Amino acid sequence: MNNDILKTLYSKEDIQDACRRLGQQITSDYKGKKPIVIGVLKGAIFFMTDVVREMDVYIDIDFIDVSSYHGGTASSGSIELVKDVELDVKGRDVIFMEDIIDTGRTLKYLEDLLAERGAKSIKVCTLMDKPEGRVVDAKADYVGLEVPNEFVVGYGLDYKGMYRNLPYVGVLKPEVYSDK
Ligand code: PRP
Ligand code: MN
Ligand code: MG
């Protein structure tokens, strides 16, 4: 698996530093509150578990799953709700955890959905932001790292379901796209 990687974009240490910084920021912003931290499956699970352990805040945890990429490298444009949250978000402070914001479609869909349900506040925390990929207007409140307009894998991010368990973020060798 590691052999399929052309170059590392962010090391394990880079990611750890980003998680620590975000966790501290969220801690000071949510003093006295009890937000629901919602992980966006599946990509956000590694990032979410790392960030919440850097937070000194009472939280609830939930998960939501929407799909847009359908396993490939390009966003399909249509968002589908695959798994809903279990908690009632009405009147609650919500923090979405994402691994990456690219076109912004996923985030826009999620924010609209929870705003409609009467969430008190909605913030978004993402490990990576790819501003050049933006198609709709969507902005993360907490950003760990910026990425260029390249397809990246690792630390939650997949190509055809693979590479999520890499402990770093990297770029695949071009030949990998054709034969897996
Ligand atoms: C990826 C990624 C983000 C979203 C970002 O998830 O994890 O959730 O796409 O893309 P966007 O800004 O263009 O909407 P994906 O739908 O591939 O599901 P996954 O997390 O299960 O891989
Ligand atoms: Mn995702
Ligand atoms: Mg994906």
Image: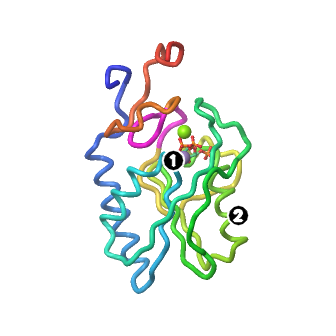
Image x and y of residue 54, in percent: 30, 65
User: Distance between the Cα atoms at labels 2 and 1?
Assistant: 18 Å
Give amino acid for label 1. Answer: Ile
- Residues in magenta, as a range: 147-158
Helix, strand or loop for disc 1: strand
Is the shortest distance between ligand 1 and the CB of mark 1 under 8 Å? Answer: yes
Q: Please determine whether, in this image, residue 133 is positioned above or below residue 4.
A: below
Residue designated by label 1: 100
Residue 112 tag number = 2
Image x and y of residue 83, in percent: 61, 54
Q: Please determine whether, in this image, residue 5 is positioned above or below residue 24.
A: above
Give amino acid for label 2. Answer: Asp
**177 sits to left or right of 15:** right
Residue neighbourhood size for the residue with mark 1, other residues' Cα within 10 Å, grouped as few (<14), some (14–19), many (≥20): many
Q: Please determine whether, in this image, residue 14 is positioned above or below residue 38.
A: above
Residue 154 tag number = none
Q: Quadrant of residue 74?
A: top right
Image x and y of residue 41, in percent: 52, 50
Is 153 within the magenta?
Answer: yes
Helix, strand or loop for disc 2: helix
Instruction: Name the residue rendered at 36%, 74% in the picture.
Output: 27
Q: Main secondary structure of the magenta part?
A: loop
**138 sits to left or right of 177:** right
Is 75 within the magenta?
Answer: no
Instruction: Name the residue rendered at 62%, 37% in the picture.
Output: 69
Q: Quadrant of residue 28?
A: bottom left
Instruction: Name the residue rendered at 69%, 55% in the picture.
Output: 137
Residue neighbourhood size for the residue with mark 2, other residues' Cα within 10 Å, grouped as few (<14), some (14–19), many (≥20): few
